[in-house]
Image (spheres, coloured by chain):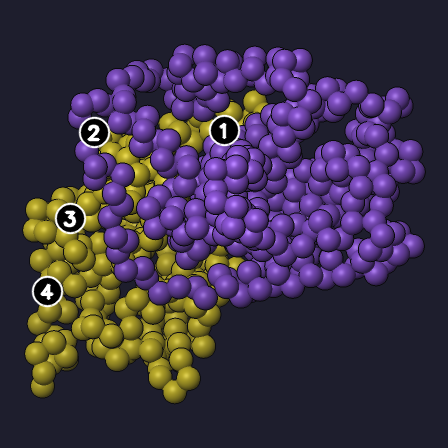
Amino acid sequence: MAFFEVDGLTKRFGGLTAVDDVSFSVDEGQVYTIIGPNGAGKTTIFNLVSLIYAPTAGTVRFRERDLTSLAPHRVASLGIGRTFQNIELFEHATVLQNLLIGRHAHAHRNFMADLFFLPSVRRAELAHREQVEKVIDFLDLQAHRDSLVAGLPYGVRKVVELARALCAQPRLLLLDEPSSGLNVEETDDMAYWIQDIREQLGITVLMVEHDMSLVSRVSDRVLAVNYGRVLAEGTAAEVQSHPDVVAAYLGA
Amino acid sequence: MRFIFKTRYAQDLQVFKHSGSVFWNGLLAVLLVAAPFVVPDYYRTQLVFIFIYSIVGFGLMLLSGFTGQVSIGHAAFLAIGAYAQAILQGLGWPFFLSAPAAMALGAAAGLLIGLPALRLTGIYLAIATLAFGFVVEEVLARWESVTGGNSGLMVPAPRLVLQPMTDPTAFYFLCLACVVAVALAVFNLLRSPTGRAFIAIRDSEISAQSMGVNLAAYKTLSFALSAAITALAGCLYAHQIRFISPEQFTLLQSIEFLLMIAIGGMGSLHGAVLGAIFVISLPELIGAMKDVMPPGLAQQPGLKPLVFGTIMILVVIYEPMGLYGRWLKIRTYFSLFPLYRRGMFQRQKAYTKSERVH
């Protein structure tokens, strides 16, 4: 049984089939990348996997558990974290507060205790803070800890979003175009971090990415999609030289 | 300039972050405790109103300022608290039982109105809360056997335990205690997971959800807490006014509350208090201005809404962070003098957001 498995996933929006019978499986410890031209359905696959959309057909299984029947907010507590293509941070909060919200899946759920800020809440807060500080150290965010997100440059926001996902201590991390909007140097950093996330933290990564140099550097397996269908699956080199993939990008 | 040297994570959890903050808040506490013995009765009453409006401000700020859910029906929760208090005290319940009961009733009403909030956002939610405000107003006017209808209801002097509290100074301290308790409770919420979940919902529902925040549960919770706090303000309001009737809890009152927190400064607890001070002292200011205005203008009706509206427009254009935002700028100007730059508080335009859940 695979660590993470998508089987026959289909999503129709009215007459448009955005994702059509997509199946793949990710082994624990892999970096698995989905590539494809614009509008190929990559982000839709992501939104299906993180349950923001309900699939028309098919199943998503994570560690032998069917996710498709769960409420969307339950995904985080199962150990799946994600980032967004266009950065969805909490703008009017500091970096630290953003990262602490990342701990929500591990937080207690007792607002009465929070109202009185009981000693148990204080202890839990300190423990969360320690965990967050580890991530801050890991991604070199010390300088921005108390800055408001609204005032940060794009490249830093991208890292903050990655940090927020890591704060939840996920087992599977979904990255939606981690390098979009980054310059060459920042993309380089991102590649190192993705490798570190896999090697040092042991987190499995499933990502959507356009930058082929980043893809070939970090990916173990690559899945190419177009018009919602799977074109090819294999190592980065295999997929890049696959005739259907070449046709999809360059025209037949 | 003050630089806080942090050596422990617990420092970020403190109520007062540095000695200056302890000093100024301490001074404020001393002044507020001394006030009823020093200032004339009239100003003591005004202070009590500021306390009551501050409590409403905290309640509405929690919902609108921190959870991002607009309500233009908050006068209804104030009314529920006020009527519940008037009726229960009339039955002989002591304050420490009747006030929690009124708050529970308010919270129940908040849960009820929170349910549509799960499906509605923005202007549609505002309309739903508006409708709720009208419904409550109508119920109060028509349910004559309980509320006394349009002829209103007399409210007895508050009884904390057994003895009626006839001394207005004692009531002043009751209100002060309630403000401090509510402020502390809301502050506690905001430094713990519940408050952070609220802020997450305000700023991005889609990512709050993927962080594991149950949107439905937290939105309803926010409504219930906000309503309970506002109902507590209603309890005090009833005792202060001594006579309540449906026309005190109209749409205009709800809008005044919303303007109060907007002018005070959205998303800050200080803003709620500053807004309350503003709303209570505005009629005073207008009264003072009338003496120097030409008689033709001073006699015009509707001067207060005019001034209120004008100030609101100016705030929205020039100081979206309200009075508290202005205060932050002034403070930063002095603490960084002479290095303050005009652009320091300028916010960057937000980048395009991903597709929304709704």
Dot 3 or dot 4, earlier in sequence: 3
Front label number (3 vs 4):
3
Q: Amino acid at mark 4?
A: Ala
Dot 1 or dot 4, earlier in sequence: 1
Q: Chain of mark 2?
A: B
A120 lies left or right of B103: left
Q: Amino acid at mark 1?
A: Ala
Dot 1 or dot 3, earlier in sequence: 1
Q: Secondary structure beneath disc 3? A: helix
Q: Which residue is mark 2?
A: B340
In the rendered image, the vertical position of residue A32 relative to residue B223, given as above or below: below
Please give the name of the residue rendered at 37% of the width and 37% of the height, measured from the top-left corner: B325
Please give the name of the residue rendered at 50% of the width and 13% of the height, measured from the top-left corner: B27
Front label number (1 vs 4):
1
Q: Which residue is mark 4?
A: A237
Disc 1 + disc 4, Cβ < 8 Å: no
In the rendered image, the vertical position of residue B8 relative to residue A127, given as above or below: above
Please give the name of the residue rendered at 35% of the width and 31% of the height, measured from the top-left corner: B328
Q: CA distance from mark 4 to mark 2?
A: 55 Å
Chain in yellow (letter)? A
Q: Are marks 1 and 4 on the same chain?
A: yes
> Of the numbered discs in the image, which one, if any, rests on residue A191?
3
Q: Position of residue A140 (x, y in %)?
A: 21, 34
